[in-house]
C-alpha cells in the first residue's frame, strides 16, 4: 500500500523494522546520481542518496554534531569500499548502509528503509 | 566526616591537590601509563569547574564557551580509578598522619600527595584594592565577574567613555587590556618597568611594542606605579606615582603571580626563596610521599609561570609514581614565549636580555615596517667556529621564531644578520643537534622525534600521537615535516585513498590526456567511488581548465555544498550570499538593491574584510529568488563560496586621494573582473594600493599591487589567517600590461602545480629555489612554459560566464534549490533565529528538532 504525500503523523521505518506502508517522496530521476536530497517524512527529515550504480540509501538528515539539517548536502564516496557521506559542516564521514559515523564510534545516524518502485523513490513507514 | 579510601591490596592512593592544567595532565598521563591500575586517584580542586585551558582563558571573552576551553577528560570522567571532588579546597595537610582535610571537612588518607595548586594573582598592597570594581585575571569566574561589571558600566547612560585601568604591562596585563576593550571599555595599561613585557623583551623591542599596542587603541603608561584607588560616586579613581589620576569603571590587577604554597608552608614543608614548594629535579619535596608540580613548585628553588615546564613536571612525577627514574631536564625549563597579542607578534627566547658574560647582540630594527629582531650570540671562538645562539627577541613579525628557537645553544648555520633580515637565510633542520627542542609546548627535542621516526612514526599524525609534538600550539608542524624528510621518510603525496597522485600530477593528467569527467579519471587512474577529498579537487581542476558550468552533468555531484548551492554554508544549515563588488566600488543604486534584498528576505548583513557585503541566513529555497533580484540589478556571483578569486581590495587612489600616484580602483576593478570565477587550489585574495602608504593592505594578499611613481610593484605570497605572512616583492616599477601578464602567469603556474588547499605562501616556499625560482619561471621563462600559461589565462578570461545567471536560466538546476524534494514549500524546522543588535542570528546551541524560539520571518 502507498500512502498520501502529506502524512503529518508518518514515521519512517528504521532499517530492519517492519514496514507497514510506503510513502512516495519523489521520482528516481529527481535524485542526481552521486548526490543527496532531503525529504520530509511526517516530522522526520530524511536524507536520500542515489549512487552512481543505482543503489538508494536513506539516513537521518540532522547532523548529530551540529543539529543542522544538512546531511543530504554532503559529498558521497567510499571509505575502504564502504559507501559513505561526509557531513558538509565538519566533514565527519557516515556509512550510507547503516548510518554509523566512521570518525566517531559513539555517534550514528538513523538509517531508514527505502526502495525504488516504478521510477518512484519510496520510504518505508512504521 | 572521614572518608576511608577503599583501596584493594596492591593499589595505592594518590591525592592530587588542584585540578588545573598541570594536575589534569598528571592524572591523564598516569591513567594512560598505569595499565595495571596500581594507583587509585582522588583530585581535590578549589575551582568548581572541570579542568580547563587557562592559557586560552582570554578567548572566553571572544566567545569561546567553558565547554570549548575544557581539557579533554571524557575518559577520566568515567574512569573508576579517578574521583574528583571539585569546589572543595584543601585546607590542611598532615604529613605525619598522611592525610589531608578540605574546606568542607572531608578527610582523606594518601600514599602519595601531589601539590598542583598553581598560583594566585598578586595584588600590590595599595589602598582601595578591595573596592567593588577591582578584579584579578586568573580564572573563568574572574572573567565572568569582569564581564558583568563591564556590561553594567557600558549600560549606564552617564556621559563620557567607559574605561578600565590594568595594573601590569606584562603578558597577562596586555591580554586583560584586550579583553576589556572587547567588552566595550577603553583600557589604560600601567606598568612600573620602563617598557612593556619587561620579562620577555628588551628596551627597544618594548618601545616598538608600546607603539604597536597604542595603535590598537590601548593607552600605555610605563615607568609609573599605582598608589591607590578611591571610589568617586559610581566610578573608581586610580592614582599613579606621578600624580596622574585615572577614572575607571573597572580596575584589573595583572601585576604578577605568587605560588599557591599555603597548605604546604603551613605543614612545615620547605619553600623556595621566592615562594613555591621546594622540590628537587624529581619534583619531590622534603617528604618522600609528597610532590609538587606546575606553578606552585619551586624546582631547585625557582618557580616557572608557563605551562610547558609544568607539563614536563607532571610527566616526571607520573613516571616516578610508576617506579621510573625520570628527572627534569634543563631544556624542559625553557621559558621561551611566542604570542600574538592585539594582532602584534611577540617572541622572546633564551637569554633575551644578553645577561651572559661577553654576549653580543645583533639587531635589525625597522621602524617603518614595524618590526624589531635581535639575536643574542656568544662570540665566535678564536678557532674561528661559528657563533652560538643564546637567545633573541622578535617584535612585529615573529615568523622566524619556529626556525630560530631550536638553534639555541647550537652554532649558527648562517650570518646572524641574515637570519633576521627580511628575505634572509632560513635555517634548516638538518643543522640542528639532537638536543634542539622542536616543540617547546611539550618539550620534544629533535632527538625524541628521530627516535620516534626510527620506531615507525612515519607521518605527522603518527609523530604527534607518539611524542605530543605539535599538539598544543601547532607552530612546529612544518618543522616536523622537514625532519621527517631529512630522516629519509618519503611523505606520501597521494591525494587520498582513491588516487595515488598529488593534485599537481592529477592536473597534468587531466590537462594532458584531455579528460573531461571525474568518472573517466577515476576509472583510468584511481579506484573506488571517490570521496569528499578527491571529488572537489577534481571538480576544481576541471573548472580551472574550463569545462562549462560547475553544475553541469556529473560535475554537480562533485561539488562541495558551497559550490553546489553557489553560496556559503553556515553553522545552522543556512547560506550566506555575496554579490561581487569589484574593487569595493558600488553605486548608491546598487547598495539600495542589496539593502532591499536583505530587508525583504530577513538577512543578517555584514561588511566583509574584502570590501563587500555578506548577507547571512538565506535558506536554500530562497537563494534563487534572492539572486533573481540581484542579477536583474546587474550583480553577479562573488564566488565567496569557491576556492577561487575572492576580492581585489583597493584604496581610493589618485582619483581622489591627495597622496595617490596611480588609479588603484581602476586597476583593482580590472584585475577582479579578469580573474573572477578562476578556480584554484585555495582561495585567492588580492589588493591594490595607490601609493606606498598601502591603505589596501596589499601585502597581506596572495598577490598585492602597490603603485609607484613609475608604475606598479607586484608582491606575492601574502596571507592573513592562522599564520600571517607579508607578500614578497616579485617585480617592481612595471607598467600595467607587464603587471597583468605577470599576475596571469603567477596564477596559472600556481593552479597547475600547487597542492590541494595550499595557499600561495607555502606553495612558493615549497618551490625548490622559492621566490627566485618563481621569478625565473614566470618572468624569464626559464622553463619555456609562459606561452602556455598566457594561453590558459586567455581561455579563462574568454570563457567566463556568471554562474548564478547560468542557474537562473536553467529550470533543471533551479529545481535543486529546495529544502525538501517532496515538500518544496516547507521551511526547514531546524533553522531558528534570535535577534541580536537589531538583526537575526542563528539561535545558539541547536536543540535537535526543537520548537522554534522566534519564528524565522
Ligand atoms: C590569562 C592567562 C594567559 C596565560 N597565557 C599563557 C601562555 O600563553 N603560555 C603559557 O605557557 N602559560 C600561560 N599562562 C600560564 C598558565 O596558565 C599556567 O602556567 C598553568 O595554568 C599552570 O598550571 P597549574 O596546574 O600549575 O596551575 P593552575 O592552572 O592555576 O591550576 C591550579 C589549580 O589549583 C587550584 N587550587 C589552588 N589551591 C588549592 C587548594 N588549596 N586546594 C585545592 N585546589 C587548589 C586552583 O583553584 C586551580 O584550579 C597564562 C595564564 C593566564 C591566567
Image (cartoon, helix red, strand yellow):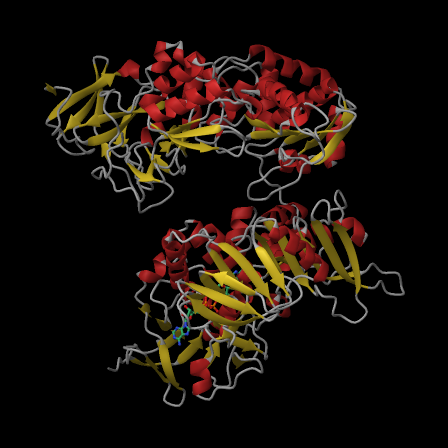
| Quarter in which the C terminus of chain B is drawn | top left
**Does residue B582 appear in this view?**
yes
Q: Quadrant of residue B660?
A: top right
Image-based side of B131 in relation to A15, left or right = right
Residue depicted at x 44% and y 12%:
B806
Image-based side of B316 in relation to B781, left or right = left
Question: Is the residue B820 above or below the residue B514 in the image?
Answer: below
Question: Is the residue B555 above or below the residue B193 in the image?
Answer: above
- Residue B641 picture location, percent across and down: 47, 27
**Does residue B136 appear in this view?**
no
- Residue B439 picture location, percent across and down: 59, 56
Residue depicted at x 49% and y 59%:
B164
Residue nearer the viewer, B249 or B825: B249
| Quarter in which the N terminus of chain B is drawn | bottom left
- Residue B820 picture location, percent across and down: 26, 23
- Residue A109 picture location, percent across and down: 28, 38
Image-based side of B105 in relation to B647, left or right = left
Amino acid at each position: 500500500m502507498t500512502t498520501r504525500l502529506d502524512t503529518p503523523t508518518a514515521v519512517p521505518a528504521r532499517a530492519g523494522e517492519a514496514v507497514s506502508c510506503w510513502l512516495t517522496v519523489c521520482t528516481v530521476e529527481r535524485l542526481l546520481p552521486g548526490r543527496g536530497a532531503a525529504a520530509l517524512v511526517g516530522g522526520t527529515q530524511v536524507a536520500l542518496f542515489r549512487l552512481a550504480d543505482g543503489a538508494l540509501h536513506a539516513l537521518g538528515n540532522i547532523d548529530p554534531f551540529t543539529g543542522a539539517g544538512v546531511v543530504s548536502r554532503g559529498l558521497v564516496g567510499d571509505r575502504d569500499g564502504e559507501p559513505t557521506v561526509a557531513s558538509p559542516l565538519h566533514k565527519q564521514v557516515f556509512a550510507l548502509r547503516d548510518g554509523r559515523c566512521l570518525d566517531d564510534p559513539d555517534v550514528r545516524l538513523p538509517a531508514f528503509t527505502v526502495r525504488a518502485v516504478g521510477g518512484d523513490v519510496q520510504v518505508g513507514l512504521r | 566526616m572521614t572518608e576511608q579510601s577503599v583501596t584493594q591490596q596492591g593499589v595505592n592512593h594518590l591525592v592530587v591537590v588542584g585540578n588545573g592544567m598541570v594536575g589534569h595532565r598528571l592524572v591523564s598521563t598516569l591513567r594512560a601509563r598505569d595499565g595495571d591500575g596500581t594507583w587509585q586517584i582522588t583530585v581535590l580542586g578549589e575551582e568548581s569547574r572541570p579542568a580547563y585551558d587557562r592559557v586560552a582563558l582570554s578567548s572566553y571573552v571572544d566567545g569561546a564557551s567553558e565547554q570549548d576551553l575544557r581539557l579533554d577528560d571524557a575518559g577520566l570522567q568515567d574512569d573508576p580509578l579517578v574521583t574528583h571532588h571539585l569546589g572543595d579546597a584543601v585546607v590542611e595537610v598532615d604529613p605525619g598522619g598522611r592525610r589531608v582535610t578540605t574546606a568542607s571537612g572531608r578527610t582523606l588518607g594518601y600514599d602519595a600527595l601531589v601539590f598542583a595548586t598553581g598560583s594566585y594573582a598578586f595584588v600590590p598592597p595599595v589602598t582601595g584594592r578591595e573596592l567593588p570594581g577591582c578584579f584579578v585575571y586568573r580564572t573563568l569566574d574572574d572573567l565572568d565577574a569582569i564581564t558583568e561589571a563591564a556590561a553594567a558600566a557600558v549600560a549606564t547612560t552617564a556621559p563620557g567613555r567607559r574605561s578600565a585601568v590594568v595594573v601590569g604591562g606584562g603578558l597577562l596585563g596586555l591580554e586583560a587590556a584586550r579583553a576589556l576593550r572587547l567588552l566595550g571599555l577603553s583600557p589604560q595599561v600601567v606598568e612600573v618597568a620602563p617598557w612593556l613585557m619587561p620579562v620577555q623583551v628588551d628596551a627597544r623591542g618594548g618601545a616598538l611594542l608600546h607603539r604597536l599596542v597604542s595603535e590598537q587603541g590601548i593607552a600605555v603608561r610605563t615607568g609609573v606605579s599605582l598608589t591607590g584607588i578611591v571610589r568617586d560616586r559610581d566610578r573608581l579613581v586610580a592614582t599613579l606615582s606621578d600624580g596622574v589620576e585615572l577614572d575607571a569603571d573597572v580596575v584589573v590587577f595583572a601585576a604578577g603571580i605568587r605560588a599557591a604554597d599555603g597548605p604546604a608552608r603551613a605543614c612545615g614543608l620547605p619553600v623556595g626563596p621566592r615562594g613555591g614548594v621546594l622540590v628537587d629535579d624529581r619534583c619531590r619535596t622534603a617528604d618522600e610521599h609528597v610532590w609538587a608540580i606546575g606553578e606552585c613548585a619551586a624546582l631547585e628553588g625557582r618557580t616557572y609561570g608557563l605551562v610547558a615546564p609544568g607539563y614536563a613536571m607532571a610527566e616526571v612525577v607520573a613516571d616516578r609514581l610508576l617506579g621510573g627514574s625520570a628527572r627534569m631536564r634543563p631544556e624542559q625549563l625553557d621559558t621561551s614565549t611566542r604570542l600574538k597579542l592585539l594582532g602584534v607578534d611577540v617572541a622572546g627566547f633564551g637569554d633575551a636580555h644578553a645577561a651572559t658574560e661577553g654576549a653580543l647582540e645583533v639587531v635589525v630594527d625597522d621602524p617603518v615596517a614595524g618590526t624589531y629582531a635581535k639575536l643574542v650570540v656568544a662570540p665566535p671562538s678564536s678557532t674561528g667556529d661559528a657563533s652560538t645562539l643564546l637567545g633573541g627577541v622578535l617584535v612585529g613579525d615573529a615568523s622566524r621564531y619556529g626556525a630560530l628557537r631550536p638553534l639555541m645553544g647550537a652554532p649558527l648555520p648562517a650570518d646572524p644578520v641574515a637570519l633576521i633580515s627580511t628575505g634572509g637565510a632560513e635555517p634548516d633542520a638538518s643543522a640542528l643537534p639532537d638536543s634542539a627542542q622542536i616543540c617547546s609546548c611539550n618539550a620534544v627535542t629533535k632527538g625524541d622525534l628521530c627516535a620516534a621516526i626510527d620506531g615507525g612514526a612515519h607521518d605527522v599524525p603518527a609523530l604527534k600521537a607518539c611524542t605530543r609534538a605539535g599538539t598544543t600550539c601547532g607552530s612546529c608542524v612544518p618543522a616536523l615535516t622537514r625532519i621527517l624528510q631529512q630522516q629519509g621518510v618519503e611523505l606520501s603525496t597521494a591525494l587520498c585513498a582513491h588516487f595515488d597522485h598529488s593534485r599537481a600530477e592529477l592536473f597534468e593528467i587531466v590537462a594532458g590526456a584531455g579528460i573531461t569527467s571525474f568518472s573517466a579519471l577515476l576509472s583510468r587512474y584511481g579506484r573506488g567511488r571517490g570521496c569528499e577529498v578527491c571529488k572537489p579537487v577534481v571538480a576544481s581542476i576541471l573548472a580551472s581548465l574550463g569545462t562549462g558550468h560547475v553544475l553541469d552533468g556529473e560535475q554537480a555531484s562533485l561539488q562541495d555544498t558551497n559550490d553546489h548551492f553557489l553560496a556559503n554554508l553556515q553553522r545552522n544549515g543556512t547560506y550566506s550570499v555575496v554579490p561581487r563588488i569589484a574593487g569595493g566600488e558600488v553605486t548608491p543604486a546598487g547598495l539600495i538593491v542589496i539593502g532591499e534584498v536583505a530587508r525583504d528576505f530577513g538577512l543578517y548583513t555584514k561588511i566583509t574584510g574584502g570590501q563587500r557585503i555578506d548577507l547571512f541566513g538565506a535558506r536554500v529555497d530562497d537563494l534563487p529568488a534572492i539572486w533573481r533580484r540581484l542579477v536583474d540589478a546587474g550583480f553577479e556571483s562573488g564566488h565567496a563560496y569557491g576556492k577561487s578569486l575572492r576580492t581585489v581590495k583597493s584604496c581610493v587612489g589618485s582619483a581622489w586621494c591627495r597622496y595617490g600616484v596611480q588609479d588603484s580602483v581602476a586597476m583593482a576593478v580590472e584585475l577582479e573582473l579578469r580573474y573572477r570565477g578562476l578556480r584554484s587550489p585555495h582561495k585567492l585574495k588580492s589588493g591594490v594600493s595607490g601609493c606606498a602608504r598601502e591603505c589596501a593592505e596589499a601585502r597581506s594578499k596572495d598577490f598585492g599591487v602597490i603603485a609607484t611613481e613609475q608604475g606598479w610593484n607586484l608582491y606575492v605570497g601574502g596571507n592573513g589567517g592562522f599564520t600571517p605572512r607579508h607578500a614578497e616583492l616579485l617585480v617592481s616599477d612595471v607598467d600595467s600590461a607587464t603587471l597583468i601578464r605577470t599576475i596571469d602567469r603567477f596564477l596559472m603556474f600556481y593552479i597547475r602545480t600547487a597542492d590541494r588547499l595550499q595557499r600561495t605562501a607555502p606553495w612558493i616556499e615549497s618551490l625548490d629555489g622559492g621566490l627566485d625560482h618563481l621569478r625565473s619561471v614566470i618572468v624569464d621563462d626559464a622553463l619555456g612554459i609562459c606561452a602556455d600559461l598566457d594561453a590558459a589565462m586567455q581561455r579563462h578570461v574568454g570563457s567566463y560566464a556568471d554562474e548564478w545567471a547560468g542557474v537562473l536560466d536553467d529550470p533543471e538546476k533551479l529545481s535543486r534549490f529546495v529544502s525538501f524534494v517532496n515538500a518544496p514549500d516547507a521551511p526547514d524546522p531546524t533553522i531558528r533565529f534570535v535577534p541580536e543588535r537589531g538583526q537575526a542570528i542563528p539561535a545558539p546551541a541547536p536543540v535537535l528538532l526543537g520548537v522554534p524560539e522566534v519564528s524565522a520571518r
